[in-house]
Amino acid sequence: MRKLFARFTFLFAMVTLVAWGVLLSARPAMATTSNPPDKTANLVVGNAVTECKQIGFDNGFKVEGKAPNGIYTVSNVGTITISNSDGKVFDWISTFGIEAVLVKAGQGFNIYYYSPPSFGDERLYAFQSRDISHVTFCWGENNVPPQPLEVEKTADASYTRTITWQLTKTVDTPSVSGNRGQVASPSPTTWTVTATKSTNLGGYTVTGEIKVTNPNGFPVGFSLTDTLNDAAQTQADIDCPSYTVGANSSVTCTYTASPSGKTATQNNVEVTSDNPNVNGDTASAPLNWEEIVVGDESVTLADNRFSYSEVISGDKTKTFQESFTCPSDVSLYVNDTYTFDVINTATLTGPNTDISRNAKVTVTCKLVWVNETATGRGLPWSRVTGAPANWFMYTAWSALQNEQTVDLIAGQYYDAGDIKATRNGTTSITITLHNGFRFANVSNNVKIHPMSAPKSYVQPGAYSVKRTASGNSITITGLSNTDFYAIHVDVQRLLP
């Protein structure tokens, strides 16, 4: 605590000490933690008024002994409280202004002056630091009572409206299938994209500053209560750099309140003084709630597969239909199957939003083969006398010699491949299939029966030469040299 008064100059103190016959060398040695007096003097000891008038004051109150701790009542004036006294050093506060304190020990007084009048001081001690014999408090006619603490405040109220977006992407038939060159089924497939907006209110906060001012000439301890006027009477957490406000100074504190909603319209603070002689104060501040938006009010919903883009500010569902055609390129198919995935991605974007979702359709395509019976182009069986109604044909050597090519006809209508032959001691026949045909996956799919002339029908199962072909070509050697050859091939034809 710091006394607010004008101290005498050292020169004035020297003159006064000499006038009272006190040697300067007799001035007490003062501890650094004690409060040095403004003057030391030899006064005439008497009652309080007698002693106070010697230094220019008309009123006084005297406490006998070693400044015993206690509250002393001054009739029609107020109270004086002595505390922390050990008989040599003490503190004091009062409910009215004190202009001087005389601390007596031995043959002299330590004099403490206060201008303007003070309501308290600390660490006062007696003449020559001896044991205190008595203390006299002096004042004039114009005393000012302790002034109440003053409090003022600010209040900033805010809450957060948090916007979140969700995006889903679905497809009603995730798997479709079909044959080469055809539209896969089921068809059409429907893609659905859905954007959903949600809003959450929270983060209700009231913050501000509280300023406590002490207009008195002595420090005052204090406490604070800060409350909102909502139903819960939400109290704020307060942080002050000090809970003692110095003489004629201020302390600024900060606070934060976290209510459950924004129903409060006012913020109230009350400061309470630790000094029973100093009143407190109250203050209020209105609350104007500020909304802080976190997230995006509007976003862009897009599906690039369908060249769709739209700015939305609320829930949105969009559907798109699509059909899938199996490719005709046979080279894509492995083991008669070609599978591909169609992935469709939708996006939802904004300054604070970046979402993508996708769905997938798996398309399975098949090559379709039909079984056909193929023979070498030649003499139709129907032209043979007595032949049954059969389209089977017989190939003449004359059509094959000289590296000529004979068509392999499947199902009477389809050119399934070429037949060539060579003869060098025996006859060799090579059958090569065209694209879109393959040898059937059965045993003995190639049968040849040499004959001189087709006179009677021979069942293919009775043919003399049987082979199993794969790939797209086969050469059969060691055949008898005859004028005709019955050639029977089991093939499969690829449907377009």
Image: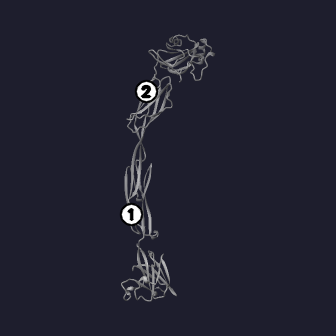
Where on the picture, by quarter, is residue 293? top left
Counting from the top left corner in percent of width and height, residue 404 is at 47, 84
Quadrant in the picture for the C terminus: bottom left
Secondary-structure class at tag 2:
strand
Q: Nearer the viewer, residue 472 or 85?
A: 85
| Outermost residue, front side | 462
Q: Which mark is residue 403?
A: none
Instruction: Estimate the x, y position of residue 195 in percent, counting from the top left.
Output: 39, 52
Amino acid at dot 2: Asp
> Is any part of residue 443 visible from this angle?
yes
The amino acid on which the numbered mark 1 sits, given as a three-letter code, is Ser
Residue 443 in the image, given as x and y percentages of width and height: 45, 77
Q: Is residue 12 visible?
A: no
Name the residue carrying label 1.
Answer: 323
Camera-nearest residue between 458 and 400: 458
Q: Is residue 180 left or right of residue 218?
A: left
Above or below 337: residue 23: above
Near mark 1 (Cα within 10 A), the count class, few <14, some 14-19 or many ≥20, is: few
Q: Which residue is identified by label 2?
A: 281
